[in-house]
């Protein structure tokens, strides 16, 4: 009988996710065939033949593991033996509190380590169709610029609506940073809809004057331009950027995402708002709310400045800012199970940005998990998902089910997301100072983040011990 462990796991795409997945699988004694199409076939953004090429910035963002969710993700990845983090740490360049890398040194280190591993076979070829029937375990990690032939094959398998070729990202706000003495909860015309309560939206009212100032700011605000190869980005009617809507007429937004009708402000029931911004719950935990219909190409600094002029959002903390890019990503909460397997064809796992996470580090982290799940399955072990209190678990839970689907028209509500503390289950107890005193303001925010990070690392350690026990008991 064939020893199943000697059967390779195939990985399509040697970017951030595919490289990490390959490492995790091979270091568990299982052979890997890594199929990377470069340099045979290029993408619009990659410039080299190196694996794990960074296509834009050379930053892995904050390395602060106590107060920043991506810094915490770095630390968890280090503890989980990440190749991407090892190469990043070895090729670090000065960047204050951020982890930035020498991009060539970084990619060369990842490429060399993978090439030197005896269980990894790197094949430079495009996989232009769904994996053949004799690949019983494969990870698709082809990223935001998945080659068109493979993307079309995936779209045929999943249904065209389930694979997006562009994102249309509206900003997301941390619920506890919204001023509810100004804003209020109510659904338009108090409609309950399926699963609603009649009070599912947070509403922020604007006077006529505030609306005018807001529209002027949108029109004047600095926008990000499209890359040359993104120019064909279609503006679907349901997802026009708000600044484009504002350009079409000063009243357009009032008849679109800023409609004031069917809503009454309980703080001032006799005053009719001229326009209203609505925010809708984004995750099952209820910690994040997205600004409905506010997809935008305004620069991030401009978004923060302009959106904080909206009454109720003066102190808004943004978990994600808006954007519109060429991207390829699945409607993962619907299509993938808790181990990143395609429900319709479980021999296929997905990893990296194609699952709807966003960023180098997040893509690599999801590659790490996909690799570990695939390795465990090959060894007939059971690997439970990391607890949702860890950064890996929070991100995985978001991708595979934590997002709240909506029924409204407009862009698909599942859109790319960076890791952030809004994805973590809340603490369940108030944070106190060292001598038990009540904390306020920034001090409280920092203490909460520290407590979330401490809980995450403790839970990660427990999960790692559990996973190792399962291997030892085999
Ligand atoms: C233009 C652009 C700029 C970005 N800038 C940043 C940034 O500054 N910071 C940040 O954190 N994130 C950025 N991102 C987002 C994202 O985090 C990165 O794209 C990241 O590289 C995603 O990792 P991945 O492994 O999912 O995909 P990738 O790193 O893109 O890897 C996918 C790999 O699959 C290969 N491939 C594709 N199709 C096939 C096929 N059919 N057969 C074989 N191989 C195939 C590709 O050649 C590529 O090597 C950017 C994305 C884009 C498109």
Image (cartoon, rainbow, N blue to C red):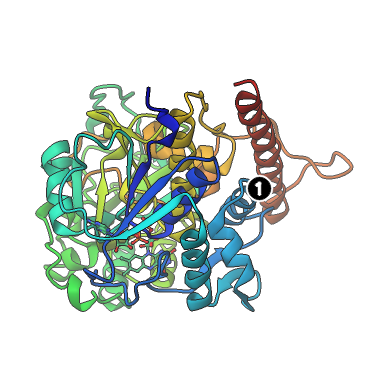
For disc 1, does the CB lie below 8 Å from ligand 1?
no
Q: Residue at x 13, y 61 (%)?
A: 235
Say whether residue 124 is left or right of residue 288.
left
Q: Pick out the residue farthest to the right.
A: 435
In this rendering, position of residue 255 left or right of residue 37: left
On the question of residue 303 being in view, the answer is yes
Q: Position of residue 331 (x, y in %)?
A: 26, 40
The residue depicted at 52 percent of the width and 37 percent of the height is 393
* Quarter of the figure with the N terminus: top left
Identified at 53% across, 59% down, the residue is 84
Q: Where is residue 118 drawn, in percent x and y?
A: 50, 53
Q: Residue tagged by mark 1?
A: 79
Q: Position of residue 110 (x, y in %)?
A: 50, 64
SS under mark 1: helix
Quick check: can you spot residue 397?
A: no
Vertical relation: 62 (above or below) 185:
below
Front one among 134 and 300 = 134
Q: Is residue 409 left or right of residue 211?
A: left
Q: Does 175 sit above or below residue 244?
A: above
Work out whether residue 259 or residue 73 is closer to the camera in this orientation and state it: 73
Question: Outermost residue, front direction?
Answer: 1
In the depicted structure, whether residue 20 falls above or below residue 289: below
Q: Position of residue 309 (x, y in %)?
A: 42, 63
Ligand 1 resides in the quarter of the picture at bottom left
Q: Quadrant of the C terminus?
A: top right
Residue 251 quadrant: bottom left
Write down the quadrant of residue 186 in the picture. top left
Of residues 405 and 355, the one drawn nearer to the viewer in this rendering: 355
User: Is 292 positioned to the left or the right of 308 in the image?
Assistant: left
Residue in the picture at 61% in, 76% down = 95
Check disc 1: other Cα within 10 Å, few if <14, some if 14-19, many if 20+: some
Counting the numbered discs, the total is: 1
């Amino acid at each position: 009988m064939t020893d199943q462990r000697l059967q390779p796991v195939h990985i399509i795409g040697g970017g951030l996710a595919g490289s990490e997945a390959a490492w995790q699988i091979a270091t568990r004694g299982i052979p890997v065939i890594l199929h990377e199409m470069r340099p045979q076939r290029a993408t619009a953004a990659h410039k080299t033949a190196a694996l794990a090429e960074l296509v834009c910035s050379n930053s892995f963002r904050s390395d602060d593991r106590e107060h920043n969710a991506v810094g915490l993700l770095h630390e968890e990845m280090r503890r989980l033996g990440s190749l991407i983090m090892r190469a990043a740490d070895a090729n670090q360049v000065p960047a204050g509190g951020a982890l930035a890398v020498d991009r060539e040194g970084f990619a060369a280190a990842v490429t060399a380590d993978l090439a030197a591993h005896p269980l990894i076979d790197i094949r430079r070829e495009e996989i232009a169709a769904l994996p053949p029937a004799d690949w019983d375990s494969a990870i698709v990690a082809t990223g935001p610029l998945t080659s068109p032939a493979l993307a079309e094959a995936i779209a045929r398998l999943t249904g065209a609506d389930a694979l997006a070729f562009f994102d249309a990202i509206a900003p997301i706000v941390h619920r506890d940073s919204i001023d509810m003495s100004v804003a209020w909860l109510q659904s338009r015309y108090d409609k309950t809809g399926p699963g609603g309560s009649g009070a599912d939206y947070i509403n922020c009212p604007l006077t006529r004057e505030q609306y005018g100032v807001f529209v002027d700011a949108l029109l004047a605000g600095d926008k990000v331009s499209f890359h040359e190869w993104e120019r064909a980005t279609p503006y679907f009617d349901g997802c026009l950027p708000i600044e484009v809507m504002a350009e079409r007429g000063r009243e357009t937004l009032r008849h679109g995402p800023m409609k004031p009708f069917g809503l009454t402000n309980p703080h001032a029931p006799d005053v009719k708002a001229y326009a209203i911004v609505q925010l809708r719950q984004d995750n099952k935990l209820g910690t994040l709310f997205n600004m409905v219909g506010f997809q935008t190409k305004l620069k991030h600094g401009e978004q923060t400045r302009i959106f904080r002029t909206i009454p109720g959002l003066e102190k808004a903390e943004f978990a994600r800012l808006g954007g519109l890019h060429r991207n390829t990503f699945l409607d993962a909460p619907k299509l993938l199970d808790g181990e990143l397997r395609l429900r319709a064809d479980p021999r296929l796992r997905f990893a990296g940005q194609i699952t709807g996470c966003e960023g180098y580090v997040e893509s690599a982290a999801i590659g790490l998990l996909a690799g570990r799940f695939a390795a465990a399955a090959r060894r007939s072990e059971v690997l439970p998902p990391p607890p949702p209190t860890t950064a890996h678990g929070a991100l995985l839970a978001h991708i595979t089910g934590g997002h709240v689907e909506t029924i409204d028209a407009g862009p698909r509500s599942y859109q790319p997301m960076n890791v952030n503390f809004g994805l973590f289950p809340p603490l369940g107890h108030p944070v106190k100072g060292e001598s038990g005193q009540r904390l306020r303001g920034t001090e409280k925010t920092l203490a909460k983040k520290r407590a979330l990070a401490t809980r995450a690392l403790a839970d990660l350690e427990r999960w790692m011990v559990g996973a190792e026990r399962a291997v030892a008991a085999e």
